[in-house]
Amino acid sequence: MTVYELWLPILAAGLATHVLSTIAWTVMPHHRPEWQKLPDEDQLHKKFTESVPPGQYIFPYAADGKAANTEEFKKKYQACSGMLIVWSSPTSMVKAILCTLTSLMIIAFVIGYLASIALPRGAEFMKVLQFTMTAGLLAHIAAKFPFVFWFRRKIILDVLDGVVYAVATGLIFAALWPN
């Protein structure tokens, strides 16, 4: 069997995960507590606007290992550390939506490709579900962890979202698997 024979479950899984992602971030309230307003946001925003050019920043900053071993750096690091990303312009919703849809379609295609080489035509519903859901878990969850280990961020609700996307992907592939 070829991956091209799985065009319908690939398309359906890509669209379904996009719809679920949109619902998770726009309708459902579970991600709202992850983000908070900065204290003195107006003052900080003014300061960022006046003196911080767009870019990615880590603080405190050390250019190398020697700088990271100084007492001054260690003192700053213990007091407060973090990341800051200053965008050069507001996020384009259209571009972000299209990029998200494209990436979810690519994930669905790769899952379909793996399934096409691992499972035969007419495979049992549960075997297709098991395989494609596991691949979905890897795609929608596992890839996030190295980033989280280095750049701490709340992720448990992203994991929950990923499980939902993986289950939807598995169910769609299993239901639409060619006989």
Image (cartoon, rainbow, N blue to C red):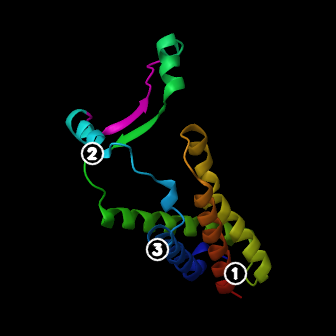
Query: Where is residue 167 drawn, in percent x and y?
Result: 67, 73
Question: Is residue 142 among the parts visible in the rendering?
Answer: yes
- List the residue tagged with mark 2: 42
Q: CA distance from mark 3 to mark 1?
A: 28 Å
Question: Is residue 112 among the parts visible in the rendering?
Answer: no
Query: Where is residue 108 drawn, in percent x and y?
Result: 57, 69
Q: Which label sits on residue 174?
A: 1
**Amino acid type, mark 1:** Ala
Quadrant in the picture for the C terminus? bottom right
Label 2 secondary element: helix
Q: CA distance from mark 2 to mark 3?
A: 27 Å
Location of residue 132 (image quadrant): bottom right
- List the residue tagged with mark 3: 27
Q: Which marked residue is nearer to the observer: mark 1 or mark 2?
A: 2
Location of residue 92 (image quadrant): bottom left
Which residue is located at x 48 percent, y 63 percent?
103
State which tag comes first along the sequence, 3 or 1: 3
Query: Where is residue 109 drawn, in percent x and y?
Result: 56, 69
